[in-house]
Amino acid sequence: MAADLAARLQAALAVPSPASSDFDLNPGTVLPEGRVLRPAAVLVGVQEGACGPEVVLTKRASHLRHHPGQIALPGGRQDAGDSDLVITALREAREEIGLPARAVEVLGMLPAHETVTGYQVTPVLATITEPVAFAPEPGEVAEVFAVPLVHLTDPGQFRIERRIWRGTWRNYYIVPWGPYYIWGATARILRGLAERVDRCR
């Protein structure tokens, strides 16, 4: 099953698709020319769960200054000591949820995603190859949970909502699961993966 899962995900990686951004659903947004984005990476880690493959996600701690309580993929900005963005994603996953690099098989990278906060986030797609007792870092992560891959790779599960941001309406994707409101950059990145998987069916 693990080999079959990896093969299906690698097939999805081979599907060409453009980079994405938090502004995809807001075509009237004018972004400044020459803007400099800060590099970051997240880990889209897929593991075998009791009911099939599932994606590991986190709920950010409520006391954080930025995005408190929001659902996110493990990850963060690239440090000076990170040789590349894969290393960034693996380091952040280890620090945030206690995922050891030895338990991760990196399959490749999805197109970068630009956020409203000025980051260029590279999603690193990987399988988690052994059972892991996740240990959330309390300073950053309130909870670690998993959502079935079949849910997150079904484009029909995604919806568009909107809210006022900086005085104007901003549209964004959501892909809710139970009590978890998955939205924004995380939902857009997962939507990109869903589109690729759907084209491989």
Image (cartoon, rainbow, N blue to C red):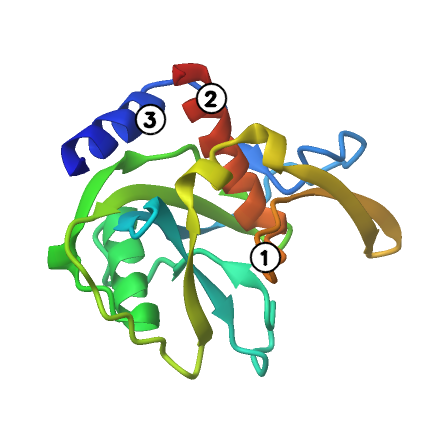
Q: Which residue is mark 1?
A: 178
Disc 1 marks a residue whose amino acid type is Gly
Q: Is residue 129 left or right of residue 138?
A: left
Q: Which residue is mark 2?
A: 198
Q: Is residue 150 left or right of residue 98?
A: right
Q: Residue placed at 59% from the left, 53% from the top?
A: 182
| Residue at the right extreme, as displayed | 167
Residue 168, percent across and down?
87, 49
Q: Is residue 57 left or right of residue 6?
A: right
The residues tagged by marks 3 and 2 sit, at their Cα atoms, a distance apart of: 12 Å
| Label 3 residue SS | helix
Residue 115, percent across and down?
58, 48
How dense is the environment of label 3, judged by Cα within 10 Å: few (below 14), some, or many (20 and up)?
many
| Label 1 residue SS | loop
Residue 193, percent across and down?
45, 32
Which one is in front in this view, the residue at disc 1 or the one at disc 2?
Answer: 1
Disc ID at residue 13:
3
Q: Is residue 7 above or below residue 152?
A: above
| Residue at the front extreme, as displayed | 51
Disc 2 marks a residue whose amino acid type is Asp
Q: Earlier in the sequence, mark 1 or mark 2?
A: 1
The residues tagged by marks 1 and 2 sit, at their Cα atoms, a distance apart of: 23 Å
How dense is the environment of label 1, judged by Cα within 10 Å: few (below 14), some, or many (20 and up)?
few
Q: Is residue 193 visible?
A: yes
Q: Dividing the image into 4 quarters, which one contains the N terminus? A: top left
Q: Residue placed at 39% from the left, 59% from the top?
A: 75
